[in-house]
Image (tube, rainbow, N blue to C red):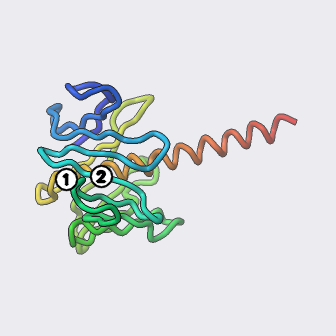
Amino acid sequence: MLELGKAGTSGVGKGVVPVLSGGALVASLRAENWREAATALVGDRSWVFAKEKGVLTGRWDVDPAGTARLRARQTSFWKGSWALDLDGVVVERENASVWKGTHRYTAGGRPVAETGTTGGWSPRPTLDADPSVPLPHQVFLLWVELVLSRRNTAVVAGAVGVAVVGGSS
């Protein structure tokens, strides 16, 4: 199982989030705070994750800008479902448990990964993936979960702010 560690721990620099498997560092992720973008180091390969025209994408840093090896696009706002293309493998993301906030990734109807969280006050995404899913794809899925959890947090914070301001007259 992969999990995002706390930034600046496990031997990575300040502002870098370690990606851990069984407590061992397997990759690192430098996510940008104000944009849906990140740079990931998986083995000796550097990846660029970004949002381009509403689609979350991943490419090697040596690939030309605008190309993508990995893609994720939302297919249903109401159901929270997404369609992903991981180097030609079509994967669907759907809610596994609304109450726990977990998601399931399937390929051809077969489960290939499931998400969870770790940590108490500041939960961080985890990913339990089938061994057939390559590590760079797993790191991309973790980043997608991070982006979507940040979006959800921003929506909730905005709704609470509106409720507080609206109710203070």
Query: What residue would you read off at disc 2?
Result: 48
Q: In which quarter of the image is the N terminus?
A: top left
Give percent across and percent down for residue 60.
Answer: 22, 56
Residue at point 47%, 64% (across, down): 54
Q: In this view, does 89 lie above or below 14?
A: below
Can residue 167 be seen?
Answer: yes
Residue type beneath disc 2 = Val
Residue at point 35%, 65% (across, down): 66
- Horizontal relation, residue 68 to residue 167: left or right: left
- Earlier-in-chain disc, 1 versus 2: 2
Give percent across and percent down for residue 100.
Answer: 41, 47
Q: In this view, does 121 lie above or below 125?
A: above
Q: Callout 1 environment at 10 Å: few (<14), some (14 to 19), or many (20+)?
A: many
Residue at point 16%, 49% (across, down): 45
Q: Which of 32 and 74 is in front in this view?
A: 32
Residue at point 17%, 46% (across, down): 42
Query: What residue would you read off at disc 1?
Result: 136
Corner quadrant of residue 25: top left
Q: Is mark 1 on a helix, strand or loop?
A: helix
Q: Quadrant of the C terminus?
A: top right
Q: Which of 34 and 115 is in front in this view?
A: 34
